[in-house]
Image (spheres, rainbow, N blue to C red):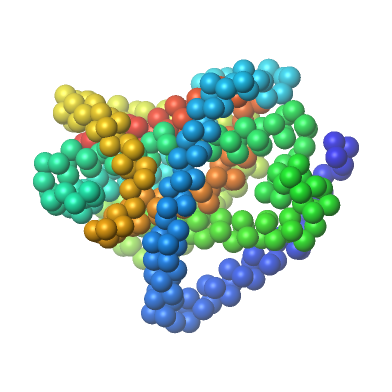
Amino acid sequence: MKNEKRKTGIEPKVFFPPLIIVGILCWLTVRDLDAANVVINAVFSYVTNVWGWAFEWYMVVMLFGWFWLVFGPYAKKRLGNEPPEFSTASWIFMMFASCTSAAVLFWGSIEIYYYISTPPFGLEPNSTGAKELGLAYSLFHWGPLPWATYSFLSVAFAYFFFVRKMEVIRPSSTLVPLVGEKHAKGLFGTIVDNFYLVALIFAMGTSLGLATPLVTECMQWLFGIPHTLQLDAIIITCWIILNAICVACGLQKGVRIASDVRSYLSFLMLGWVFIVSGASFIMNYFTDSVGMLLMYLPRMLFYTDPIAKGGFPQGWTVFYWAWWVIYAIQMSIFLARISRGRTVRELCFGMVLGADSVNLDPVDCTR
């Protein structure tokens, strides 16, 4: 497998089935928006209400897995014999930039007010208890927990990349040790790849649907440009071109430099907001929210609300966990690819502290 010549170009069995499936689903949606909305809501309700517990248990198991990797027998194992490919600062910045998006910066802050107006645990809307729990729940959904759940896959991909020297570029490749190379490259592996690509495309659609309107609204507010469908299309096109250029330039010249620049700009913006806002309130609210998170963490982890059926865990927690799960393979491949020469413990700590630093930003308290 080491000496295989890498093939380039489109592989029909992996490219066309997801394209056809997504195309058909999009056509059906556009053909009858009302019916599509009913079906989507029904599927969402079924998945979150019937299988929400499975997503919550998955996150709990992965959280314990993170602790096992950090403090277990493999913690000091190095992923490859080479020295680290990137400096620690650039490595952290790339993790930081990988999760710094318009959706994260906006929803990680504004959703606090949704939690206050429709709080969990039977709390009164807009009450003191709801306000105390608002930021804590935002830290729960965007904080260390979801990033820690990427540890197993990231370490696994890094092992395949740098120890076994395998070109792991698709989900089915990771199944070779479990089902054998024949099945991983056969029909079973193709089905796995197709299923993942369809799910990833729709997850990207969710991300673009949340982030693009934010950018267009900012442009309308700053420059007076009307928010139109054409403007949305232009922004998405520019985003695709910019990311394609960064990827084409490679990790060292493209992704690393873009990540460094974006990280410095983010720190500059956050520092300015921190200075001009109430720093004392920010730190007090953030500190109190960390304590609330630690106090309510067991309840948050297992909260399904089966008696009152208020819908909070299904509409927020399960939705976010499903979203994080869909991105697991894509993000884990990237986190592994930039972590050559790091130990298992460094990789696990790096993804929690580096990638999550934007989500634990105390300045969120000001918004």
Question: Which residue sits furthest front?
Answer: 307
On screen, residue 118 above or below 131: below
Left or right for 44, reference 217: right
Q: Position of residue 248 (x, y in %)?
A: 65, 42
Q: Residue at x 23, y 42 (%)?
A: 134
The part of the image, by quadrant, that contains residue 165 is top right
Q: Residue at x 66, y 20 (%)?
A: 77
Quarter of the rendering occupied by the C terminus: top left
Would residue 232 be seen by someone viewing this image from the given angle?
Answer: no
Q: Position of residue 126 (x, y in %)?
A: 12, 49
The part of the image, by quadrant, that contains residue 336 is top right
On screen, residue 236 above or below 174: below
Quarter of the rendering occupied by the N terminus: top right
On screen, residue 252 above or below 171: above
Left or right for 45, reference 54: left
Residue closest to the eye, 130 or 360: 130
Q: Position of residue 356 (x, y in %)?
A: 42, 33
Left or right for 304, reference 8: left
Would residue 29 be seen by someone viewing this image from the given angle?
Answer: yes
Q: Residue at x 30, y 27 (%)?
A: 271
Q: How many marks?
A: 0
The part of the image, by quadrant, that contains residue 156 is top right
On screen, residue 233 above or below 275: below
Q: Position of residue 251 (x, y in %)?
A: 63, 34
Q: Residue at x 31, y 62 (%)?
A: 226
Question: Which residue sits furthest left?
Answer: 127
